[in-house]
Amino acid sequence: MDTTPPLPLRKQRDYRLLWSARTISITGSEVSKLAVPLTAITLLTASPAEMGLLTAAAPLPALLFGLQSGAIADRLTRHRPLMIACELVSCAAAATVPLAWLFGVLTVPWLIIVALVIGTAGVIFKSANFPYIAAVVDPSQRTEAMAGFHASYSVASVSGPGLAGILVQTLTAPFAVLAEALSFLASALLLRSIRTPEHNEPTRSSSMWRDIVEGLRTSLTHPALRAVLGAGVTINFFAMAYIAVYMLYMVNTLDIPKGMIGFLTALSGAGGLLGAWLTSRLSKRYGENRILLVSVLFFPLDILAVGLLTGPLWVKLTVLGLTGVMTGVIVVAFATCMGVITLRDTPTAALRGRVNATMTFAVQGVLAVGGLAGGILAEFMGLRPVILLSAAGIALSSLWIWLSPLRPNRPQTSHTFPAPPQNPTPETLKNLMEAKRHSVI
């Protein structure tokens, strides 16, 4: 058995290509988050109802196709071709926006269809990308790899809006969407350059529904997976209720200058980069379980500080800046550990796509409900009470981790491995070692 430690991720060509592909693609998507609504508002004079439909089009595919995409991913022998195809489809869809504008046929329904196509391709891509990470990255480096991917989102959140503003100003909004198309194309080319072979054992099933149910059952009955799922849903519900009123709270209650809001948002992205760096290093000493628990314990403290905030403007800006950085750190730490634990504790590799799709479906699907609840409650309770309620609700997420096998120093549920036979063959020993290598740490 080869005991040579793997190269650092920064020196691994295929990981660099995969990380670069995601970073470029996500940055392009951040540009379109500004360019597409501006196109609808300024050039197509979209109504509030049309803007609502356009806004809902992006997350809708996760609810419609999230579970099915996981079943599809688990049926594949190779995931990379599907990932490349998804990026190319997204590239073609985004490229139609400036072309349609040139020919005078661009409409709001056209933008909605483009958003649905790109959203659907993105859902399928993520379902295939999750198990594909296991082919590219050694198990001992998965936390660092996951942290690196979440850092991509932080990089995009910092650089994307500024780049979008420049492109919209110089090229006009429809042609700024072309940057998103080019980012998808660049991502596809980078993915095509990866050389690591895949040896995925596809699941065998004749029923899509049966595959979906198996992924749901595994996520809900496995103690560790159920804990991260419950914590993720709880956090996202109350966090979205908080986000729904946060902007109004800053402007109307705290009297924060509008020009400072973008700066404070960028600090959260910078905190995400710091969180990725800290998580990849601290996990080697303390483990993902302990970092996960610490992150859920600190989650509500930032929101509580914002909810209790008073005083002069400089105090408010200082506290909001610090909490923005801390929130970025905590979000990336939690998301990284959640991804690693899901990859680590899924019973078999053949279930990874479906379990991840179930997590995404539940954790992302609850966002709409949380945002709606936050807006309605603010009408009756006011802005500050909703923020304090959100902090209390997020605090409940710690119970999911504390009462599960993920709690540090709690006895772990042992996994049973077949006893080695007398005079085992080298192939048998290899299989047993591989099984133990993928067990719960």
Image (cartoon, grey):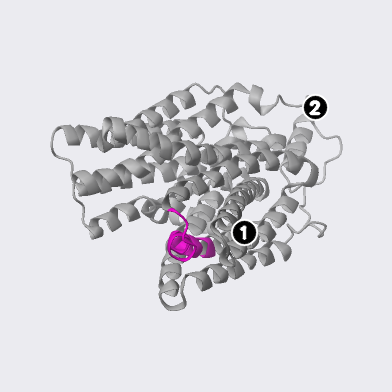
Q: Which residue is mark 1?
A: 302
The overriding secondary structure of the stretch rendered in magenta is helix
Q: Is residue 154 above or below residue 60?
A: above
Give the residue at x 39% y 31%. Answer: 184
Q: Residue furthest right?
A: 422
Question: Can residue 251 be found in the magenta stretch?
Answer: yes
Badge 1: how crowded within 10 Å, few (<14), some, or many (20+)?
Answer: some
- Give the side of residue 335 with respect to residue 22, left or right: right
What amino acid is labelled 2 in the image? Thr
The magenta stretch spans which residues? 238-257
Give the residue at x 49% y 21%. Answer: 193
Q: Quadrant of residue 86?
A: top left
Q: Which residue is mark 2?
A: 3
The mark that comes first in sequence, 1 or 2, is: 2
Where residue 58 appears, as percent x and y from the top left, is: 36, 50
- The image's mark for residue 21 is none
Nearest the viewer among 416 and 373 is: 373
Q: Is residue 152 above or below residue 239?
A: above
Where residue 149 appears, as percent x and y from the top left, is: 57, 38
Question: Can residue 167 be found in the magenta stretch?
Answer: no
Is residue 107 something that shows in the picture? yes
Of tags 1 and 2, the one toward the viewer is: 1
Give the residue at x 58% y 63%. Answer: 311
Badge 2: how crowded within 10 Å, few (<14), some, or many (20+)?
Answer: few
